[in-house]
């Protein structure tokens, strides 16, 4: 993550934050893995799906 702050004048400021994939990828993968473990899809819901 890269953070920069610039003060062009006394009243204004420019805050720039650059978030790269490496900064959040591990947490997202962990959350997705947890969602996959806890997903509860009843069989009746699968029967109602129309597969093309």
Image: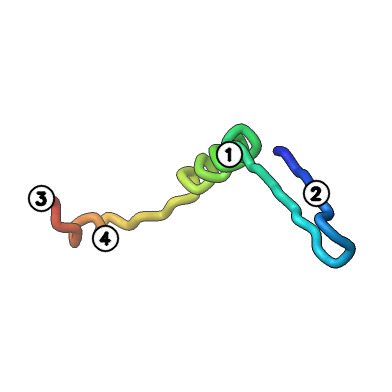
Instruction: Tell me the SS state at disc 2.
Output: strand
Going from the N terminus, do you reach mark 2 or mark 1 first?
Answer: 2
Residue annotated with mark 3: 52
Asked where in the image residue 21 lies, by quadrant, the reply is top right
Residue denoted by label 2: 5
Residue toward you, 8 or 25: 8
Disc 3 residue crowd, few under 14, some 14–19, many 20+, Cα 10 Å: few
Label 2 CA crowd tier, 10 Å (few <14, some 14–19, many 20+): few
* Residue lying farthest to the bottom in this orientation: 11
Q: Is residue 33 left or right of residue 10?
A: left
Identify the residue at image location x=24%, y=55%.
46
Q: Give the CA distance from mark 1 to mark 3.
A: 32 Å
26 on left or right of 5: left
User: Rounded to the nearest whole Å, what is the CA distance between mark 4 and mark 3?
Assistant: 16 Å
Distance from disc 4 to disc 2, alpha carbons, whole Å, reads: 51 Å
Residue position for label 4: 45
Residue ID at (19%, 61%): 48
Whether label 1 touches label 4, CB < 8 Å: no
Circle 1 is placed at which residue position?
Answer: 30
Is 30 situated above or below 44?
A: above
């Amino acid at each position: 993550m890269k953070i920069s702050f610039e003060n062009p004048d006394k009243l204004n400021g420019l805050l720039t934050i650059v978030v790269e994939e490496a900064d959040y990828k591990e947490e997202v993968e962990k959350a997705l893995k947890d969602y996959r473990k806890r997903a509860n899809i009843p069989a009746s819901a699968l029967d109602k799906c129309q597969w093309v």
